[in-house]
Image (cartoon, rainbow, N blue to C red):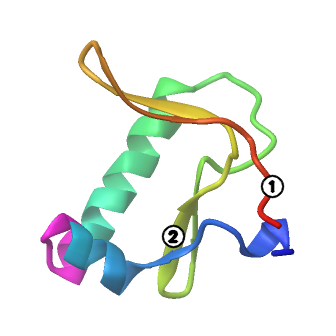
Amino acid sequence: RIDPAEQGWIEIEDLSKMLGLEIPHTNIQIFRARKQVHEALAGKSLSTQLIERRRGAVRLGCSCFNITRGSRQEIEQASAEVE
């Protein structure tokens, strides 16, 4: 069983390779995404950061989310525990 606090983290270096970006550019994109999410949800009460960072790694801070591109759903993640 994996502790939920340790689930979902990806190293920035690995994410950068997956995205085909240099690490500094990935960090800029993460900063911009966090800012856009914060602005889009202004005034909403959230119990968690939606994009969490720790030294050298990043993750989505919620276990249930949808990602859409235009009208097309890219990802749907329902809450699930890893055993």
44 or 8, nearer to the observer: 8
Where residue 19 sits, quadrant-wise, is bottom left
Would residue 68 appear left or right of 83 to someone viewing this image?
left
Name the element at disc 1: loop
Judging by the rendered image, the residue that carries numbered circle 2 is 58
Please say if 65 is above or below 20. above
Is residue 23 rendered magenta in the image? Answer: yes
| Residue at the (56%, 26%) spot, across then down | 41
Q: Which residue appears at 51% of the width and 70% of the height? A: 58
- Vertical comparison of 12 with 51: above or below: below
> Marks 2 and 1: CB-CB under 8 Å?
no
| Residue 49 highlighted magenta (yes or no) | no
Task: Please state which of residues 82 and 14 is positioned toward the viewer in this rendering.
Answer: 82
Q: Position of residue 72 (x, y in %)?
A: 28, 19
Q: Position of residue 17 (x, y in %)?
A: 22, 78
Mark 1: give few (<14), some (14-19) or many (20+) Cα within 10 Å. few
Q: Check the image and report above or below for 25 versus 72.
A: below
Taking depth in this image into account, of 37 and 61 the one nearest to the observer is 61
Residue sitting nearer the eye, 65 or 51: 65
Q: In this view, does 74 lie to the left or right of 34?
A: left
Q: Mark 1 points at which residue?
A: 81
**Residue visible at 74% across and 75% down in the picture:** 6
Residue type at the position of mark 1: Glu
Q: What stretch is highlighted in magenta?
A: 19-25
3D distance between C-alphas at marks 2 and 1: 19 Å
Residue 50 appears left or right of 3: left
Q: How crowded is mark 2: few (under 14 residues within 10 Å), some or many (20 or more)?
A: some
Q: In this view, does 5 lie to the left or right of 24?
A: right
- Of discs 2 and 1, which sits in the foreground? 1
